[in-house]
Image (tube, rainbow, N blue to C red):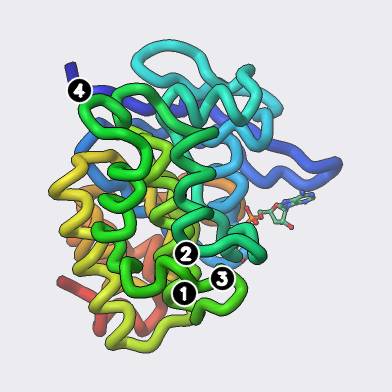
Amino acid sequence: MTARLAAKGIVKRFGGVTALDDVSLALDQGTVLGLIGPNGSGKTTLLNVLSGTMRPTSGGVFLDGQRIDRLPGYRVVRAGVAKTHQIPKPFPGLTVRENVLVAATFGGRAPMREGADLPEQVERILRLVELEPRAHAFASALTVQEKKRLEFGRALATGARFLLLDETFAGLSPDEVRNSVEVFQRVQAEVGFGAVVVEHVMRAVLSLAQRVLVLEEGRAIAEGTPQEVVRDPGVIEAYLGSEATNVAP
Ligand SMILES: Nc1ncnc2c1ncn2[C@@H]1O[C@H](COP(=O)(O)OP(=O)(O)OP(=O)(O)O)[C@@H](O)[C@H]1O
Ligand SMILES: [Mg+2]
């Protein structure tokens, strides 16, 4: 059966700030949902709620119909949902290989380990994210792009069925974005995870996602295919502006 991740009626308040106001979404394993919106619109907060890092004020998160928003974060990872950080957070004093090994060991789900021992699994991840040549480098010595690859690799190493990726293409040159999009697509085709991809780089999100959800000030203002969303007058007004003419697929 295809796994399904869903959020229903999510509200998240920080004191007087309503970061998320009745946001719902659903995606199946194997599909990519793009999440876009202006700065401060609630994208990272929504990923935090989906990953169990933050509890919603109200509403629920469901994996295969089971409620997961009351579970501690590590149990959510074991259930099969893993998040990358907007600012990569590897263990700086460990090597690339060791960082992936830690994620595979402590975040791992049994199915990822089936038929492969841990070292084999780690080598597979390093190959998938193209970090084999840097396996012995300390995480602190990596470039921005390599750190983002490592962050992706660590999430993959948990064996997650759903990955929540927060701006994995931010701060990269256009060539690096193209290359990272190719890596993402290849890995997704091989591993078959579902993903929520938060991204300001519109070309990247439009080429990766089958559907896109647009947030503005904590509210979902549009949801649809990339083609539908970039033509939506409300989305152009709130977020895309004149850029929209450059990004229409
Ligand atoms: N831990 C927190 N405490 C208080 N307010 C917070 C907290 N986290 C987020 N907020 C507020 O919630 C709102 C949404 O923030 P969030 O970081 O989710 O936005 P974002 O869409 O990810 O923005 P960006 O594109 O800049 O990363 C903002 O008003 C922010 O200031
Ligand atoms: Mg954010």
Residue that badge 1 annotates? 170
Check if mark 1's residue and mark 2's residue have beta carbons within 8 Å. yes
Q: CA distance from mark 4 to mark 1?
A: 31 Å
Question: The residue tagged with tag 4: helix, strand or loop?
Answer: loop
Quick check: is the Cβ at mark 2 less than 8 Å away from ligand 2?
yes
Between circles 3 and 2, the one closer to the viewer is 3
- Say whether disc 3 or disc 1 marks the residue closer to the N-terminus: 3
Picture coordinates of residue 191 (x, y %)? Answer: 21, 43
User: In the displayed structure, would residue 13 be above or below residue 17?
Assistant: above
Q: CA distance from mark 4 to mark 2?
A: 26 Å
Q: Can you see residue 50? A: no
Residue that badge 4 annotates? 2
Q: Can you see residue 98? A: yes
Residue 160's disc is none
Between circles 3 and 1, the one closer to the viewer is 3
Badge 4 crowding class, 10 Å Cα cut-off, few under 14, some 14 to 19, many 20 or more, is few
Question: The residue tagged with tag 2: helix, strand or loop?
Answer: loop
Residue that badge 2 annotates? 167
- Say whether disc 4 or disc 3 marks the residue closer to the N-terminus: 4
Residue that badge 3 annotates? 138
